[in-house]
């Protein structure tokens, strides 16, 4: 693996499979009575979060602790970014205390690339703006593979706010690299221009996207980003794009339904679908810990490789 | 004192000259242009090597000198030092300083600082609206008599169609153009990069090309309505070029400029070689290959009038931040000539006489200022170019206070040998060994 995990864009299919295989072994650790291995003992990991996050931050922290790393959470209120210390200065100050890895969540796309250029610590992208969220895509792939054995040849429908979603970008890159057929669906106002160049099918018809799908992946409607009048109302959004049991019936009989969370019930997904038999939403959360342990382990292993070389 | 420039190729499109002419300079003016001139005893003879080019001094009609108010980015002294090092004998500076150049006090301050620096000529451009707030016209007669050569609210567009109408009508009595930063603000929104595949893939908020062309169409229509002269600044989109062609073919008084970065670079630079490099963030943004190619076509076919740099210095602290938070803009004065040679002349897009029109003749005509000519009696504002000089763009050599350029490290063919303002050598490139010491 490279020094940092900035995005799926930098990973080869072989590296993606390596993470997924390593995550299998890591999941086993979580099933033991004593859920801890000494792998990262003596390593310091800083979780630097510039955006509020419950799931991702908790998941990283549990993963770090299960690997015996010393972890530290730095939560920076979004408002202090503009008036206070710059990201670069904050990072350099943290770097001065010699951490081994920095897990960064930031509202600006490319923030991890900036840190990667100035920091010796390994940078793990825990979500940067509208760009990438690589560990989410890896845990999604892990979950899909568990149910479908392979990713190649699957039809995956991704429905929701495509424009603002870093989960979309990472998943499209990963799924197309591994040979899935990816359909993306949302209102035309929320389709990133040129997205078809990434090798996906674009449609505004949920039924077309879902028809014969092996996987349905829902994306959150980010209400905090809805100032731009992208669609008339949440009610109308649900009527046209909401994932209901009736729409799910167009998919394969063994379809799985995914959501990166947090969900807006009754906006992008009906509760009976979210809680229904096809839903693997909580499995995704569980797998997140194993996948993040794998990423931390593989990046830390890289440190030793370089030192030995 | 008399000085005779002997040898080299003289390119002076305004007077239809292109060939082996010598230039005699006397008392800061061009005394004679002719073949095989000889000086008398007190004439310093400067021999210009074969292959070098003598042309009327280059004029950059779109620069930000940042003074008053943002002297940590640039001052009039450092900005004009950068100008002459880039071959420019004159620059026109934008009014979005702090305070805004919307009254004679600021204009006079700028001119005084320029006189103290005593390098390039500086032509201030005044604001269209008071405080560039887009509400009330600035005192345009006062600005004009203090020395402003045009008006603009650059940094943003003239806020409303009716204000633009009044500005065009009112300024026409002073025979000065309104320079427009074309950008429909609601379409631009909080965009930071050209709306297209690259921005989508990098997760950057987009600015559609139509944000520019819609405003250009508004202004061209208003130019037709009022008869006022509008100059479209830093054009970036092929749709805008189409709008300008439409306006020109229908007799509107419209002219336009393009920057070197918009005819050299595309939004592919956002992703590589350095992803999210804030020195690829400018407004208007780098656009797609089709737009870049359209700019080259417009330069070749005559639709584009001017090459201007939009020199926009920013302190490195301001650029060493997240892409979203970085200010728009790059420096341009010291890279323009090399980029023009390398990408236009040596690439056979345009010939040298056309380049001189774009960089000297046309800006002088549009701003109605001296220059753009090597006619006998004109001020001896002369640029000597070295078309084959190998140039490696280096931050260390830049005279500008700021080094925010995406071209640092580039190797280009063609550069500036020397710059003369009023007959005085204000810049000599040490790599060319021209003997131009001022007596």
Image: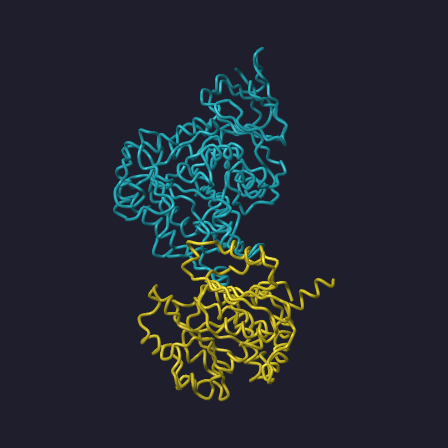
Chain colours: A yellow, B cyan
As drawn, which residue projects farthest toward the right?
Answer: A309
Between residue A308 and residue B174, name the one nearer to us: A308
From this viewpoint, which residue is outermost toward the top? B41
Q: What residue lies at 46% left-to-right and 33% top-to-bottom?
A: B59
Q: Is B381 located above or below residue A236 in the figure?
A: above
Q: Position of residue B412 (x, y in %)?
A: 60, 42
**What is the quadrant of the C terminus of chain B in the image?**
top right
Residue B111 in view in this figure:
yes
Q: How many callouts does the rendering have?
A: 0
Expressed as whole percent of the image width and height from the top left, the position of residue B352 reads: 54, 35
Q: Which sits in the foreground, B19 or A84?
A: A84
* Apparent side of residue B7 relative to residue B226 in the rendered image (left or right): right
Does residue B359 lie above or below A57 as drawn? above
Dividing the picture into quadrants, the one containing residue B109 is top left
Q: x%, y% of residue B394?
A: 59, 41
Can residue A131 be seen in the rendering of this structure? no
User: Which residue is nearer to you in this view: B88 or A125?
Assistant: A125
Left or right of B430? Residue B353 is left
x, y percent for residue A268: 39, 77
Q: Is residue A36 above or below residue B342?
A: below
């Amino acid at each position: 693996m490279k020094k940092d995990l900035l995005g799926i864009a930098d990973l080869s299919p072989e590296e993606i499979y390596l993470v997924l295989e390593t995550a299998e072994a890591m999941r086993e650790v979580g099933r033991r009575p004593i859920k801890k291995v000494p792998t990262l003992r003596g390593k310091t990991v800083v979780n630097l979060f510039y955006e509020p996050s419950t799931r991702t931050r908790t998941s990283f922290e549990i993963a770090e602790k299960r690997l015996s790393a010393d972890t530290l959470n730095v939560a920076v209120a979004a408002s202090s970014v503009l008036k206070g210390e710059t990201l670069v200065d904050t990072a350099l100050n943290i770097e001065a205390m010699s951490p081994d890895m920095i897990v960064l969540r930031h509202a600006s796309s490319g923030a991890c690339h900036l840190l990667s250029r100035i920091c010796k610590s390994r940078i793990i992208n825990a979500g940067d703006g509208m760009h990438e969220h690589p560990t989410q895509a890896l845990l999604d792939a892990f979950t899909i593979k568990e149910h479908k054995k392979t990713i190649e040849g699957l039809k995956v429908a991704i429905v929701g706010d495509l424009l603002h979603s870093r989960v979309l970008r990472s998943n499209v890159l990963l799924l197309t690299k591994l040979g899935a057929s990816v359909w993306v669906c949302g209102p035309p106002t929320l389709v990133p221009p040129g997205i078809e160049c990434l090798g996906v099918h674009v449609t505004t018809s949920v039924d077309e996207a879902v028809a014969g799908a092996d996987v349905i992946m829902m994306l959150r409607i980010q209400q905090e980003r809805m100032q731009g009048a992208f669609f008339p109302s949440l009610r109308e959004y649900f009527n046209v794009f909401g994932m209901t049991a009736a729409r799910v019936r167009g998919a394969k009989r063994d379809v799985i339904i995914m959501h990166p969370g947090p969900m807006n019930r009754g906006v992008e997904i009906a509760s009976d679908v979210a809680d229904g038999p096809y839903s693997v939403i909580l499995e995704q959360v569980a797998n997140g810990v194993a996948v993040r342990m794998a990423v931390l382990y593989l990046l830390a292993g890289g440190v030793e490789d370089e030192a030995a070389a | 004192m008399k000085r005779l420039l002997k040898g080299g190729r003289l390119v002076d499109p305004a007077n239809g000259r292109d060939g082996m002419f010598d230039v005699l300079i006397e008392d800061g003016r061009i005394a004679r242009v002719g073949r095989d001139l000889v000086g008398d005893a007190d004439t310093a003879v400067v021999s210009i090597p074969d292959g070098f080019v003598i042309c009327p001094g280059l004029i950059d009609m779109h620069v930000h000198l940042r003074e008053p108010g943002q002297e940590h980015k640039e001052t009039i002294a450092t900005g004009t030092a950068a100008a002459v090092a880039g071959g420019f004998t004159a620059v026109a500076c934008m009014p979005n300083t702090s305070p805004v150049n919307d009254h004679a006090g600021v204009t006079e301050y700028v001119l005084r600082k320029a006189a103290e620096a005593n390098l390039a000529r500086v032509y201030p451009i005044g604001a269209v609206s008071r405080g560039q707030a887009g509400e009330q016209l600035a005192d345009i007669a006062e600005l004009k008599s203090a020395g402003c050569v045009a008006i603009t609210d650059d940094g943003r567009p003239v806020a409303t169609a009716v204000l633009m109408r009044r500005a065009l009508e009112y300024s026409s009595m002073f025979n000065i153009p309104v320079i427009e930063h074309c950008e429909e603000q609601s379409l631009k929104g909080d965009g930071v990069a050209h709306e297209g595949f690259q921005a989508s893939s990098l997760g950057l908020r987009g600015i559609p090309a139509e944000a520019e062309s819609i405003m250009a169409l508004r202004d061209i229509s208003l130019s037709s309505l009022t008869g006022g002269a509008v100059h479209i600044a830093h054009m970036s989109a092929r749709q805008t070029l189409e709008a300008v062609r439409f306006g020109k073919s229908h007799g509107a008084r419209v002219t336009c400029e393009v920057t070197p970065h918009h005819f050299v670079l595309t939004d592919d630079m956002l992703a590589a070689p350095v992803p999210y490099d804030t020195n690829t963030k400018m407004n208007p943004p780098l656009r797609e290959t089709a737009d870049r190619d359209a700019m080259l076509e417009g330069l070749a076919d005559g639709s584009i009038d001017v090459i201007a740099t939009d020199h926009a210095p920013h302190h490195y602290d301001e650029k060493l931040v997240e892409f979203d938070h970085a200010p728009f803009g790059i420096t341009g004065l010291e890279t323009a000539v090399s980029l023009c040679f390398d990408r236009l002349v040596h690439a056979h897009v345009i010939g040298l006489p056309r380049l001189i029109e774009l960089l000297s003749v046309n800006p002088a005509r549009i701003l109605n200022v001296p220059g753009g000519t090597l006619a006998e009696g004109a001020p001896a504002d002369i640029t000597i170019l070295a078309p084959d000089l190998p140039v490696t763009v280096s931050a260390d050599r830049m005279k500008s206070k700021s080094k925010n350029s995406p071209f640092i490290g580039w190797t280009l063919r063609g550069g500036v040998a020397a710059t003369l303002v009023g007959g005085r050598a204000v810049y000599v490139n040490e790599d060319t060994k021209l003997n131009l010491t001022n007596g």
